[in-house]
Amino acid sequence: MMQENAIEACIVPTSDSHQGEYVASHFKFRKYLSGFTGSAGTLVIGKDKAGLWTDSRYYLQAEQELRGSGIDLYKTTLPETPGIPEWIAGMNYRSVGIDGEVFAARDALKMCKVFNKQAIRLIDNFKPYALVWPERPSLPDSPLSVFPLKYAGKSVEEKLRELRAELSRQGADYLPVSGLDDIAWLFNLRGSDVDFNPVGLAFALISPDTNKLYTDKKKLDNSTLSYLKQNNIQLSEYTSLYADLDKLPAGAAVFTDTARINYSIYNHIPSHCRRVEGTTPTTALKSVKNPVEIAGFRTAMQKEGVALLRFWRWFEAALEEGKEFYETDLVRKMSEFRLEQENCKGDSFYSIISYNEHGAIVHYSPSESTKARILPDGYLLVDTGGQYLEGTTDITRTFSLYRGATPGEFKQDYARILKGNIALTECIFPSHTRGSQLDIMARQFLWKDLLQYGHGTCHGVGHFLNVHEGPQSIRMEENPEIIKAGMVMSNEPGIYRAGKYGLRIENMMLVVEKGESEFGQFLGFETLSLCPLDLKAIDKSYYTRREIDWINTYQRNVYNQLSLLLSEEEKVWLASKTKEI
Amino acid sequence: MMQENAIEACIVPTSDSHQGEYVASHFKFRKYLSGFTGSAGTLVIGKDKAGLWTDSRYYLQAEQELRGSGIDLYKTTLPETPGIPEWIAGMNYRSVGIDGEVFAARDALKMCKVFNKQAIRLIDNFKPYALVWPERPSLPDSPLSVFPLKYAGKSVEEKLRELRAELSRQGADYLPVSGLDDIAWLFNLRGSDVDFNPVGLAFALISPDTNKLYTDKKKLDNSTLSYLKQNNIQLSEYTSLYADLDKLPAGAAVFTDTARINYSIYNHIPSHCRRVEGTTPTTALKSVKNPVEIAGFRTAMQKEGVALLRFWRWFEAALEEGKEFYETDLVRKMSEFRLEQENCKGDSFYSIISYNEHGAIVHYSPSESTKARILPDGYLLVDTGGQYLEGTTDITRTFSLYRGATPGEFKQDYARILKGNIALTECIFPSHTRGSQLDIMARQFLWKDLLQYGHGTCHGVGHFLNVHEGPQSIRMEENPEIIKAGMVMSNEPGIYRAGKYGLRIENMMLVVEKGESEFGQFLGFETLSLCPLDLKAIDKSYYTRREIDWINTYQRNVYNQLSLLLSEEEKVWLASKTKEI
């Protein structure tokens, strides 16, 4: 097919048409072609050579899965590894085919710069699926249904009004939306087309006088159809967005967020239109939670807290009884406890439950082939989260499983992490502060001892939506998005001791107003997550008086908020886990 | 002249051809035309209307100085004030004249974007000086002389070798340099063409096989001429840079730092050349001090420390004796004490010495018309610095002049500032950290109480060069330049209580290596400045044990380093100022 189309190299990325973290199997062409199953990686097939580019999380896995395929592995985190466009230019391929629908516009535009310099031709609608992938799974067709106002907290009408005000403020008439969570948020709809994210495949196009939803009609029942009608949302076929873009009138100002639309959307915006560049306003509006959503998060935290401590109590007993169980059993068990809670719709991601040295592998995901047996006198890292109608949760706790005293090294590391977590939670900052300005608060106690962690400190969290949500973040890298009151974020410093253990403490936080002065508005954080810190890991001598007070206040709050939902036996157990230090 | 040249508006900025902080009187055309004497402001003369754009520091002064001139004042810090190009477009002027030689390329390019959209024509070589400014001062012709290697620490040969390696690393063949301090640093020359900065008017052009210095031959004596010859530096007339740029060969890669070259230089780079954009490598290389420069800074700090404490002691006695003296007297006196020190060449900026409410005006500069009389029971802010052959200094101390106890409000503010200053000095961070990641360390204790200061926290400091030196900084705004070992920077949090006092504590710091681990190199700071903190302003109860230790260690170090250079009487006095708390 490449030969027929005079294409000398084609590039197959991991992403779908919506640039989400999870993709439906319909889009897993890279996995199908290469056999590599990792969640990140790009395949390049040249006329006489093929390569797969992936990062350090997947080196081992990719080597195993690519063995015998004839595909070379390119390790993106090594400085000597060429970029994909540079490699293509070096191979002297003169024409490159991609499916523009599965490339973020920004990435494709970056590649184009290199290709243009080298006079390499880009064919951006190369879609060899029909011939090459006969058994391609069809698009997912799970239902898209109404997310009740009592959970969403804001009507579609109001959201559309706010969105139009924002578009007009930024001088734009039209907004194509392709983020599945943005569309779910805007229209108060939820689906189940991809793993862990309660969203459905769709596009949207907001015009001065229409609100178009592009999705498969099969996904909608009569009540949803009438809901759309009531809310003045016009329905179109999933892929007809592209044709509608072609028809945009001359002079129209079209909002264009190259990080959040695919390259085909970008190319279908007619050249007689004007592009208004920026962060998609739905992404920005969605990140600030409304009072109902915030109240919902608090409810979800209580339910998650009960599930977490039932899980903890169960696993502590099982350990004591000498039962044989593995990391994967804990993943399953955690889901079970969570699903017992009302309005719980499942996990918000595949739990990272890792024992001892597995904890030091930051993106470790327990599987049948890797699972470790849990034994006492070790450490367990549990990073887990749930999807509740009231909100999405994400938490990490690291437990000492020692029957006697926990080794001092671990307690010192625990202090480095917990002190950073507290310092970030406690900090107060002016409005208009960016995440990179705050990041050091969480890292300072590690840096003092020449330690570091390689991931970000905080990500946004969706409301019964994606557990990783933008546009804000707190990390070392610059991100121009500011932190705003009403945002919900994680706070997750960690430390990873290769061959020994990983240690991370993650709480979700709400950004709150802290007061106003002649210098403007100041903001701060309020911790939302409700699960005790492991007292066995806390050596008081590492903490200041203020930090000890913080810990005791936090533990007391966990007890007060959860005890009403517990049996007498559980209450006693929780009291022992939250006693004052 | 505008009519003759068919120009409907002309723009006259404050800057010279080198984008420095201080400009020679030859370039003070804006001041000549408008009568406004402030150090920042842009004059626009339209065919039927004129305006001056300046910031909040100068509103009062500009109103007074512009009175009766027919020039309107535009306050740049007000949101409703139009930008200059937007104002010109709004006035419907169709052609704009500027002297491209006195505009930073980046600023001119930004204006061009607006002008192009509106089809406004830009004439970039409008130079009405001869007719309009008959008594224009000629270019300064003070000597440019050799800065001895024993102070500079690195030969021109070595600097050129390092510079060429860096140019080649960045893929550039040619480098035009217009920063006066960059040229002084590169060729180990010093001059006195502008106030406070020991530099001389010149350009440079580094080619693969020549090192050209463009300056007035009159500035060079025979020994300097032979020094240039020895070092393979070719001499050309000051303004012949432009013609030389015109002759650059086709395909040449020319380093282009639009923030640091003027618009005429930018335009004289032929279109058949390729531009390599970035931060001028001399600016980056100069910012990392060599061991001789670092040792020199330590010597300069001792001399400055002696001058400061003689000044302090004198003024304390004068105050006690009830002598009548004013802020301006202190500025003069400080210079006198400083000039008594060996190798001192004067002040590194006009001292900000401000009493009580004057301290709250961040850019206050005492003058005959504003000077306050210094009386006891008040506060004095002293921000001052010197030029020594061994290094440039910059320090701020704020003193309580209270005879009895200092008011608690001031002591609390002093703690907020000093705690921030210490926290920043003490922090440890990975190499590749940017300034905006560290800034919160200095501000956190203010932010906790909803307080803030409106200036940056740290700027680079030159070595017997400019007291404000780039490219690095520590401030809230993002600056992609990383902090490197060997950089010398200020650390100057402050707080400003309108109508009462200003309080700032500034020390210079050296960036030092703190060790290496599996996570790479870590850096930290070492305080260089030697002047006691005012014990009368310190209430111990606000500080942690660690902070008190830091203060005592600092004071003890000041005593140890300075006492050898003092008389017995002075030693006793210094001991009283540095006694343990």
Image (spheres, coloured by chain):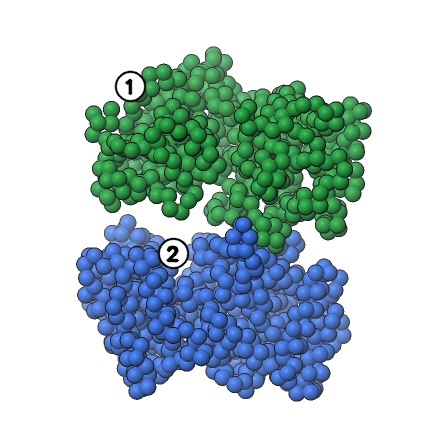
Chain colours: A green, B blue
**Badge 2: chain ID:** B
Assign the N terminus of chain B to one quadrant of the image. Answer: bottom left
Q: Residue beneath label 2, please?
A: B83
**Are callouts 1 and 2 both on one chain?**
no
Q: Residue beneath label 1, please?
A: A131
> Is A232 positioned to the left or the right of B297 in the image?
left
Q: Nearer the viewer, residue A450 or B549?
A: A450
User: Is the residue B275 above or below the residue A560 in the image?
Assistant: below
C-alpha distance separating marks 1 and 2: 58 Å
> Is A266 positioned to the left or the right of B307 in the image?
left
The answer to which quarter of the image holds residue A306 is top right
- For badge 1, the amino acid type reads Leu
Which type of secondary structure does the marked residue at label 2 adopt?
Answer: loop
Q: Residues within 10 Å of mark 2 (few under 14, many from 20)?
A: some
- For badge 2, the amino acid type reads Gly
Can see residue A471? Answer: yes
**Badge 1: chain ID:** A
> Is A555 positioned to the left or the right of B291 in the image?
right
Q: Position of residue A572 (x, y in %)?
A: 81, 29
Which type of secondary structure does the marked residue at label 1 adopt?
Answer: helix
Circles 1 and 2 in contact, beta carbons < 8 Å: no
Question: Residue drawn at (34%, 62%), measured in percent from left and top?
Answer: B165
Q: Position of residue B241 (x, y in %)?
A: 25, 70
Check the image and name the residue furthest to the top. Answer: A222
Assign the C terminus of chain B to one quadrant of the image. Answer: bottom right
